[in-house]
Image (cartoon, helix red, strand yellow):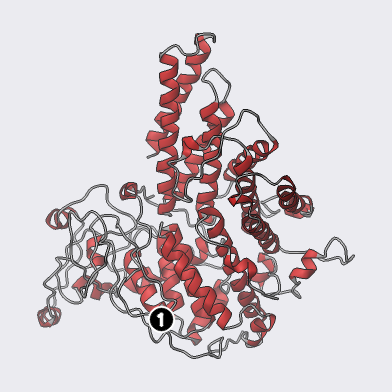
Amino acid sequence: MSWSSSSPSGSTTTTSALTSPLETPTSSTRPPSSQQSPKSQSEGSESQPSINSANQSASDQSKERVTVPSACVACRSKHLKCDGLSPCTRCSANSFECVYVRSRRGFKGPRKNGVQGKIPTAAPGAGSSCPMINPNAGRGPHVPTGLATPPDNRLQAVPRPLDIPYDVNNDLTTYDPNKNLPASTSGLELRERCIEAFFYHFHPAHPFLLPRTEFMELRQKQGLEHLLAAMRYVGSAYVSSANTVALGLEAERLVYGADCPQDAYRVQAMLILTIGLDGYTYQEKALQILMDAQDLALKLRMNKREFAFLNSNGSQIAEESWRRTWWELYIVDGMIAGVHQKSDFRMKDMPNDVDLPCEEKEYLSGFIPQPSSLSDFDDESFDGKELTFSSFAYRIAALRNLGRVLSSGLLQSSTPDGDAILRVDNHLVTWRLHLPENKKKFINNEGKLDEMLFQAHMITEATTIVLHREFSELDSSVAKGVTSCAPHKPIIPGENYNIHAAKTVQAAQDISKLISIPVPLIKHTHFFTCVVTLGSIVHLSCWSTLMPYMQDDDLKQQLRLNTGALKTLWQVWPSAGKAFGQVKGVAQEIFQSKKIAVESGYWTNFAQEDVMRVMIDDQRIMDELDLLH
């Protein structure tokens, strides 16, 4: 397979520069359980092998010592002693980028007016601002500025697994990327582990880059450092030995560097950064980079069918990758708009005639069929053609339905328009009814998950809740503190259990069923976190209205399932930890209110043994939630 070494755009190769080391937290995304002084950190950490040769000592003495901070970002994030050289000995030995920031112990938050003429600084904990931002760097009109939403303080105790299962397929080297590295392991090898982790864990959920084999071949022929840096950043989330902060700094520095070509590979890198930053709770920053990626994609005319052909060098796999890149921009834009409810689904109105992606098995095999168009998909029921469409195509269709809900104006209306709701809901029902038989199960005959189909159903259930919850009369006030994914929107409670409530509750139950599919949860897109959270809000609303004597076992089991899923996703994505803490807090508040009501004898007409039995069961669930933390 031959690959072109030319840039897939034909446009200029410069863009506005993002200068500076960016404001960074001084711990990695796997923060410690407590804060230590630099001295205690160095004394309590594992000692690293020292370099004792005379040549190395002479070299170290000739280095310029950095006088402001006591340790670089890489050493501080691992709680290792730093010699303060520039670069320090440890970063030199491991090929890490050596970055110093001023320590601000006791700092409670970012300055409102930014930093004036100084190197950006950071708090020593999990970070109070996005690690990918420099508020004062020179930039063009679309380079992001401003602080992103800070992560929740609960993330300072984020649970990290000793090992994440890594039973790779035949296309990958078999190893465990989380196994403790020997002292002789080079930084280069660790960086490659992040690339492998990207392909194994992340790529199946967002499969727009070339398959691994073809990508590695292209990598040897064309400089793709900005893209590789973004891949390492996201891949490092699955590799406990990796320094996610330093890799994130490197990724944005390369993507927004003055010498970064304005080509479609840059679009791919920015899209990867968007997804990773969103999973790390930096929602505003992620949205800014996503908009930059969209602008560049339009400038390159990636929304035109011919772009894929003209920039593929005759490779059908490359053509397919470019088609997938456009549609993944569309998917991610819709997911962010839907689950965070802070932005418009901008790409839903962008004209495009890009053909639909093929099945994942076809993409990975390299045997790409003749692509179908979006009009083929829409006319399937009427034109009499015997066409089959991929799971990716049904995923796109699910996002189009979400776009219809978001653009309908129903979510901003104070009075429901029954006809308008019915029209939009019909699209959701039609999507389900027209699924082929082979698209009604998530696990194929080989026992593998169809992640694209999983996401299509995930999106459809979330869209159902977004549409109907507004008119369900289910009291949402109890969950007003669950804001990790989207701001709270009050719903006027009512006396009747209407059709909207029924559809909302059913969708929440179906989301809980998705959790039980026998596939590791960390293999799913991180956007599943917010979908689970959305379902949890519905469960909490229902549970809060039930009296203690009622048989609510199924509802409580679904809540346990949801919180367990968030806890598992938290092992990789901090956004899940933030959601878990909020859902857990609301569940405990509901339990305490019910307990107080029982102790005060409020329900005297009901059998005391029934009430106490349920309350004991509820207490057991609360104890389990505490253990989950």
Name the spot of residue 181 as percent of width and height, x first.
32, 62
Kindly give the residue lying farthest to the right in the view shown: 384
Q: Amino acid at mark 1?
A: Gly
Name the spot of residue 145 as percent of width and height, x first.
37, 70
Side of 303 where 433 appears, left or right: right
Q: Residue at x 53, y 57 (%)?
A: 525
Q: Would you say residue 535 is visible in this rendering?
A: yes
Density class for disc 1 (Cα within 10 Å; few <14, some 14-19, many ≥20) is few
- Of 105 and 27, nearer the camera is 105
Q: Residue at x 64, y 36 (%)?
A: 501
Name the spot of residue 89 as percent of width and height, x first.
19, 73
Q: Residue at x 66, y 87 (%)?
A: 314
Count of labels in the image: 1
Q: Which residue is mark 1?
A: 140
Q: Would you say residue 216 is visible in this rendering?
A: no
User: From the image, which quarter does the C terminus lie in?
Assistant: top left
Q: Residue at x 54, y 45 (%)?
A: 534
The secondary structure type at the circle numbered 1 is loop
Picture quadrant where residue 511 is located: top right
- Of 296 and 66, nearer the camera is 296
Work out whether 217 lies above or below 94. Answer: below
